[in-house]
Amino acid sequence: MLNYNNPSLTLISSEVRPGAVRWRSPSNIALVKYWGKHGVQLPRNPSVSFTLDGAATDTTLSYSVREAPGEGVEVALYLDGELNKGFTDRTQIFMEKLLPIYPFLKQLSFKIKTSNSFPHSAGIASSASGMSALALCLVSLEEELFEPFKDRAEFNAKASYLARLGSGSACRSIYGGAAVWGTLASLKSSSDEFAVPVTESLHRVFQDYHDDILLISKSEKSVSSRAGHGLMEGNPYASARYAQATRRTDEMLTVLREGNIERFGEILESEALTLHALMMSSHPPYVLIRPNTLAVIERIHQYRADTGMPLYFTLDAGPNLHLLYPNSVAAEVKQFIREQLLYFCEDKMYLADRVGKGPERLEVSEQDLAS
Ligand code: DP6
């Protein structure tokens, strides 16, 4: 097990000047799903995802020396310019969990400004982009206040580790292209504690793959992912599922390397349906897909049968569909979406996205430096 605990990371307060760091970090879409966890945010099975491009969180972390150092962490979080009590509490709990790793967090006062590129009401989970952006800010902060990292890989591994503690799927957002989280015998560098990039071995066809997100319902979902992971512990199919996900992550890596888009689609769709079947077979059972989710799935199957287009769907833990397809068929598929699928989306909304290059460190404004 990795041990990042470091009691020596404390500051001489009189030497610290106020400052700020800022990162934009994208969301990701799992191709093979993480569903089930144990211990301290450790996955029951490996997963692999594409990192997205447009759907992202922009976070600025400003800090100054705390007037009266206390036990916990002093932080206020502003979402789209407004103080947000719920996110402030969640962030404070997260940062306090990090105190053995970063004892200096107690010595500073933090203001976090965050915004998402997608509307908050869109029903898209922001935990992967949000937690990865915050983790990247914290690791940059460490680098500013203490020693620089040996190299980018070391920096990224730590950011991914911290992001995982905030939200499991967030650890995969640290890398552009595709990332694997969870130990896999065939991938030496893989770990349950952080994600690793598999971008280098991504076939050309997947490098600019599209992912259009159809917003079937923007309502808050009735069962959180955290509760869903918990219910896997009593699920009668759990052990077979974990073995299947391990095999599939392995196979998906071969598929991503070879550019086999038909097999890619088969695994992708089965993963989506398996995830929701696991929810339906939990105790108590629950259903997150909506009638319109099924209507769209049927139309995609029909479209594929009629045209042979390599258009496949996946689902997260909710009713919205991600439609994945290669750039070479983008014009035809977008026409199909507009003409036949938007009807099933709430307010006819969808977000056009694609595989992205990963997080980006941004300049901070003068105003953020001063506050
Ligand atoms: C269905 O990462 O949101 O999207 O670790 O409790 O924060 P926590 O869960 P979360 O679970 C995401 C599950 C998923 C599949 C995936 O992204 O792999």
Image (spheres, rainbow, N blue to C red):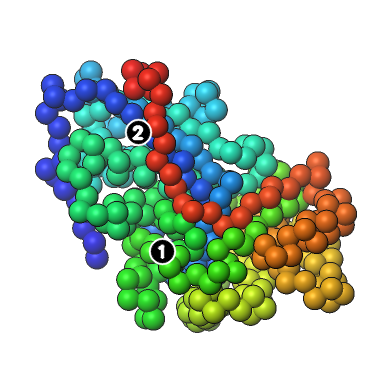
Which quadrant of the figure has residue 19? top left
Helix, strand, or loop for circle 1?
Answer: strand
Helix, strand, or loop for circle 2?
Answer: strand
Disc 1 to disc 2, how far (Cα)? Answer: 24 Å
Name the one closer to the observer, 227 or 350: 350
Badge count: 2
> x and y percent of residue 213 in the render?
69, 53
> x and y percent of residue 64 in the render?
27, 23
* Marking on residue 21: 2
Query: Dot 1: within a 10 Å radius of its alpha carbon, few (fewer than 14), some, or many (20 or more) residues?
Result: many
Query: Which numbered disc, 1 or 2, marks the residue that appears first in the sequence?
Result: 2
Q: Is residue 61 above or below residue 306?
A: above
Amino acid type for the residue under numbered disc 1: Pro
Which quadrant of the figure has residue 118? top right
Write down the residue under mark 1.
Answer: 197
Residue 199 left/right relative to 141: right
> x and y percent of residue 109 in the render?
29, 25
Residue at point 65% right, 59% down?
210
Residue at point 59% right, 60% down?
208
Residue 7 left/right relative to 333: left
Q: In this view, does 77 lie above or below 140?
A: above
Residue at point 69% right, 55% down?
212
Disc 1 C-beta below 8 A from ligand 1:
no
* Marking on residue 238: none
Quadrant including the N terminus: bottom left
Amino acid type for the residue under numbered disc 2: Val
Name the one closer to the observer, 166 or 310: 310
Quadrant including the C terminus: top left
